Amino acid sequence: MGKKMEQKRTNIRWYFAITFFIIGVIAYMDRSNISIIAGPMMEDLHLTKTQFGLLASFFSLGYALMQVPSGFLAEKFGSKKMLTIALVWWSAFTILTGVVKNHGLLYAVRFLFGIGEAPMYPSNAVFNLFWFAKGEKGRASSALLAGSYFGPVIAPVVTIAIVNMFGWQAVFYIFGAIGIVIALLWIIISKDLPEQHKMVNEAEKNILWKTVIS
């Protein structure tokens, strides 16, 4: 009798790497959009250049303060829950950026937006820890990083087109809605561990387990 044909390995983990690329694109478009529509936004809300600059400062403050806690939370609750919450959180505050008119509230919204985006990289790191072999982790991490560079490249074209058709507020509504849709897809398709995913076969699991025990 001939040898049993070796099972062809699935590559579900790389589809998740592509998903993280998309998340990176959206996240960094959400960040850069506000600078692209600065003119009409400042005019409508009567913001000075200094006041508008503070919006970026409040985002950075929230983002920085939440980095370490979000890493702890991602390890405790898993990348599936943490990234879902983060996506919904920052998308909601993206939408609110187009709604709020009061300057003080707008600063608070951008601060909370920064808090929402902070778990993205820690969640990705925790996910990659379990889903990729030792020799693959660098490539896996680069997917999110690539998205973070690609997002700001295409943001001006997309954002200006939306502003011309629907106004500057629509930029935040549309991108916020996209983020929430991605969050829903993420919670449906993702699992914290490869062995929990029905589409990951034994051949793919074995690759990852060999790395864990080596």
Image (spheres, helix red, strand yellow):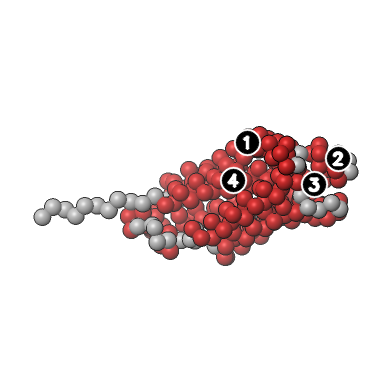
Which residue is found at the position 67% from the left and 58% from the top? 89
- Residues at circles 3 and 4 in contact by the CB criterion of under 8 Å: no
Judged from the image, the secondary structure of the residue bearing numbered disc 1 is: helix
Circle 2 is placed at which residue position?
43
**Three-letter amino acid code at the position of disc 2:** Glu
Which residue is found at the position 81% from the left and 42% from the top? 41
Closer to the camera: disc 3 or disc 2? 2
Residue 89 located left or right of residue 9: right
**CA separation in Å, label 3 and label 2:** 15 Å
**CA separation in Å, label 2 and label 1:** 25 Å
Where is residue 51? Give x, y as percent. Answer: 86, 44
Which disc number belongs to residue 154? 1
**Three-letter amino acid code at the position of disc 3:** Leu
Which disc number belongs to residue 55? 3
Sequence-wise, the earlier of marks 2 and 4 is 4
Which disc number belongs to residue 24? 4
Closer to the camera: disc 2 or disc 1? 2
Judged from the image, the secondary structure of the residue bearing numbered disc 4 is: helix
Sequence-wise, the earlier of marks 3 and 4 is 4
Where is residue 176? Give x, y as percent. Answer: 67, 51
Sequence-wise, the earlier of marks 2 and 1 is 2
Which residue is found at the position 46% from the left and 57% from the top? 130
